[in-house]
Image (spheres, helix red, strand yellow):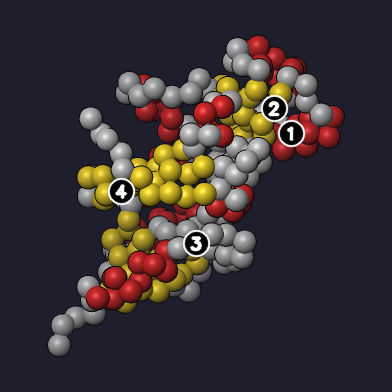
Amino acid sequence: MSRLWRCAFLTMDNTEGWSIDSDLAIAPLQTLGWQVEIVPWRCLRADWAAFDGVYVGTPWDYPEDPQGFLRALQRIAASGTVLANPISLLRWNLEKTYLRDLESRGAAIVPTMWLDSLDENTLAGLHDALSAERVIVKPVISTNATNTFLLDRCIAPATRETLLATFSKSACMAQPFVSAIQNEGEYSLFYIGGEMSHAIRKIPKPADFRVQEEHGAGIHAVTVDMK
C-alpha cells in the first residue's frame, strides 16, 4: 500500500466574510495521494512535524499580529516540515517595503512615500509631494484593502480624523492613484516552481477601486503574453 502524504493548509481562526477557494485544491491533491488538513496559523497544538508539507494558504488576518504570524512560521520551519514558500521569502513579502527592493533591482513601481506615521502636516502635503490629484494611503502591512484610503485634495473631516487616528503611530505608504485600476483592473501572475502557471485579472465593481472579491470585485482568468 502506497504511503499517504499529509499537507496542512494554513488559514485563519475565523474565515467568515472572506472569499476562500483553497478547498478546490483538496480533491486534486487527494488523487495524487495527499491528505489535506485546514489548520489555523494560531493553533498552538498543531504537530507540524507530522505533516510532509505546510502551504501558506489563507492566513489573511496576519496584519492583526504580524510578529505572532512570523513566530508561527518559524515554529513550522523549525519542525523540519517543508514550508511553502520558504520563510525567508514570506518574511520579505510580509511588508510592502519589498517594493523598494524590487525598485532597487530595476523594477518599475508606482512612486511611493514611505512614512513611519502620518500627521496633519504630512497629510496636507501628500498630493503636492506626489504630484497627484488623488492619492492612496494604506498600511505597510495589510491585506484585503483594510485601512486603505483614496483621497482627493479636499478630504472630508471624518475621513481625515479616521486617517490620522489609524496612522498616528503606524507605518503607512502613499502613492498617486492609478485610475486605470478602475477599468483595466489588476493582474496577478502565479508562479509554481519558478515558472508562470496562470494569471487572473481583478476588476473592481463600478465606482470602487478595491480589487478583492470581498469588496465585490470580479475575478477573470486571462492569458498573459510574457514577451
**What is the three-letter code of the residue carrying label 4?**
His
Left or right of 31 in this view: 174: right
Q: Position of residue 21 (x, y in %)?
A: 45, 63
Give the mark nearest the N terminus, 4 or 1. Answer: 1
The residue that label 1 is drawn on is 163
Q: Which mark is residue 20?
A: 3
- Residue under label 4, please give it: 198
Q: Quadrant of residue 223?
A: top left
- Which element type, helix, strand or loop, lies under badge 4? strand
Q: Which mark is residue 31?
A: none
Are dots 3 and 4 in contact, CB under 8 Å?
no
The residue pinned by badge 2 equals 151
Instruction: Between residue 210 and residue 157, name the one nearer to us.
Output: 210
The Cα atoms of the two marked residues, 4 and 1, are separated by 37 Å
Tell me the quadrant of the picture where the N terminus can be found: bottom left
- Dot 3 or dot 1, earlier in sequence: 3
Q: CA distance from mark 1 to mark 2?
A: 10 Å
Q: Amino acid at mark 1?
A: Leu
